[in-house]
Image (cartoon, helix red, strand yellow):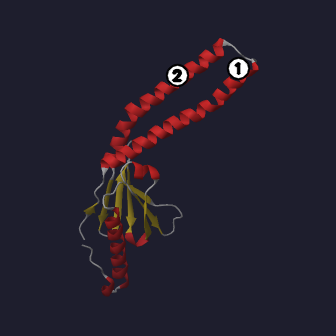
Amino acid sequence: MKEIEFEIDREAVRQYFQTVHVIACFGILAFCFVPYLLIGTLDVFAHAFLRIGVFSKFFGLMFFLTIVAIAYSFVFAPWLCRWQADNFRYRLDGDTVRIDGGVFFLFRKSIPLERITDVALVQGPLMRLLGCMWTMKIQTAGSPMTEAVLYGVREPEKIRELILVQRRNVYAEKSGDASVNVVFK
């Protein structure tokens, strides 16, 4: 069987990763400032440590971190997400699913079809909101966790069926049962 490369909706993947980066960045920023806001509010009401210096330092730090978060979200994150989406490559090569990706640290993973136990299609609420992007989660025998996650594969049901049919063909070849072989069109 020749190599089949899976088509990826790179723009949807980029948009999804960028949205996740922005939500995480501002979520962490908000989580970090909640204790300071509570302490500052309690100080004002208690009049215990009401000093202009403390509040100006706090708001100066808050302003600086907000500027850093905005710069990250709108300058660095789009570049990082585009690069990440462009580096994904998924393909079925004979009896192996091959996955390439990464930005700073590149990775290449090969999963033999005979080890695959399930291929699950998952679509979270953010993915639905951003245009019906799906992820494919590949489970393997002997691993309690997901072996691989494929983002933004176009026609995920067709690719899932292709992997499962090819897996059945590999099992049939190994067992010597030629009547089980299925041809995928």
Viewport quadrant of the N terminus: bottom left
Q: Position of residue 138 (x, y in %)?
A: 43, 63
Q: Which of 35 and 96 is in front in this view?
A: 35
Other residues around mark 2 within 10 Å, as few (<14) / some (14–19) / many (≥20): few
Q: How far apart are marks 2 and 1 (CA)?
A: 20 Å
* Secondary-structure class at tag 1: helix
Question: Which label is found at residue 14?
Answer: none
Viewport quadrant of the C terminus: bottom left
Q: Position of residue 120 (x, y in %)?
A: 43, 64
147 displayed left or right of 96: right
Which residue is pictured at 35% across the width and 44% down the height?
14
Q: In this view, does 42 lie above or below 185?
A: above
Which residue is pictured at 58% across the width and 20% down the height?
59
Which quadrant of the view contains residue 154?
A: bottom left
Whether residue 16 appears in this view of the structure is: yes
Amino acid type of the residue that numbered disc 2 sits on in the rendered structure = Phe
Which quadrant of the view contains residue 181?
A: bottom left
Q: Where is residue 93 in the image (x, y as percent from the top left)?
A: 29, 65
Q: Residue furthest top?
A: 52
Which residue is pictured at 46% across the width and 65% down the height?
139
Question: Which label is found at residue 63?
Answer: 2
Amino acid type of the residue that numbered disc 1 sits on in the rendered structure = Val
Other residues around mark 1 within 10 Å, as few (<14) / some (14–19) / many (≥20): some
Whether residue 105 appears in this view of the structure is: no
Circle 1 residue: 44
Sequence-first tag of 2 and 1:
1
Q: Position of residue 75 (x, y in %)?
A: 38, 31
38 displayed left or right of 46: left
